[in-house]
Image: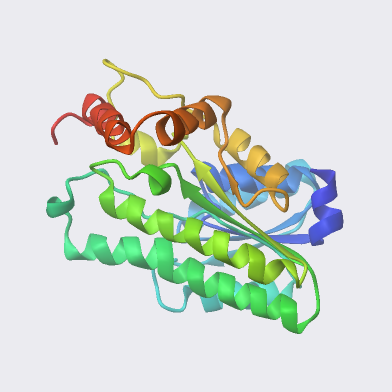
Amino acid sequence: MASLRERYGNWALVAGAAEGVGEGFTNTLAASGINIILADVNKPAMAALAEKVREKYRVETLEVTVDLATPDAADQCMQAATAKDCRLMVYVAAYSKVSRFTDLAPADLDGFLAVNTCTPLHLVHGFSNRLISSKKTGGILLVSSLAGLIGPQYVATYAATKSFGIRLTEALHEELKGNGIDITVCCAGTVSTPTYWAGKPSFEKMKPPVMQPADVAAYALGKLGSKIICIPGLTNRLQYFFLMNLIPRRIARQLVNSAMIKMYGAL
């Protein structure tokens, strides 16, 4: 972690910083001595976390209260990043809802597209161009999901929009490396976050490995620049390898969908 500051400078932007996985990244980066730009819509939680990391880790913070679903969200984040000459960006924010696809409201569909695709796309574009124009190196870490690699039922739109960041990272890795910009996507499995527990999963018939946000953050940051796609958690990596490489795709889908039914019922 100490090398992060040497490679990417004194400031990091964490979009979706206030709780869950974003809080894990905020704490992990601050523990390495990096100042944090926190961007989130939850102003009270963000302010409390900013105060905590300032006191505990003796770093500076800048809070950007922004709804990452709005059209100008990326611009607001970029203004803060430019002001602090920030060269490391972590996009954690996600719109997530466990539901049958046909039960989603049109506003939900817009939320998935805005938070999971539009804002990160504009932010990666702006962040990359600023680094290139100023001839500076940097790092970009997008937080996706194993759902973006597999596509389980009940999270169809979430999985589809999360796969966007995976494909984007794979393509941009080749384009950006010549400019000294590292880009990695973290495909996390089940993580203990308020959003996950709000879905009320049942563990009566099965329990997936549930990781802690700090462990996800530490693993992903450790892989930034050395891996294009990283999967935190040994069990997650083994399960993914089994599903994608050792059995037919049809059977893999059946297993994943069966697991969703065991946790969420027939909805």
Which image quadrant for residue 106? bottom left
Give the residue displayed 37% in from the left and 68% down from the top.
Answer: 114
Q: Is residue 15 visible?
A: yes
**Figure check: 73 above or below 95:** below
The quadrant of the image that shows the C terminus is top left
Residue at far top of view: 204
Q: Position of residue 13 (x, y in %)?
A: 65, 61
Residue at far right of view: 6
Q: Position of residue 158 (x, y in %)?
A: 33, 52
Using residue 252 as the reference point, say whether residue 171 is left or right of it. right
Q: Position of residue 53 (x, y in %)?
A: 69, 46
Q: Is residue 192 visible?
A: no
Using residue 222 as the reference point, say whether residue 146 is left or right of it. left
> What colour scheme does the image use?
rainbow
**Figure check: 230 above or below 185:** above
Using residue 150 as the reference point, say whether residue 9 is left or right of it. right
Using residue 44 as the reference point, say whether residue 96 is left or right of it. left
The quadrant of the image that shows the N terminus is top right
Give the residue displayed 51% in from the left and 75% down from the top.
Answer: 122
Q: Nearer the viewer, residue 266 or 146?
A: 146
Q: Position of residue 203 (x, y in %)?
A: 31, 19
Which image quadrant for residue 82? bottom right
**Figure check: 134 above or below 215:** below
Give the residue displayed 60% in from the left and 67% down from the top.
Answer: 172
How many numbered marks appear? 0
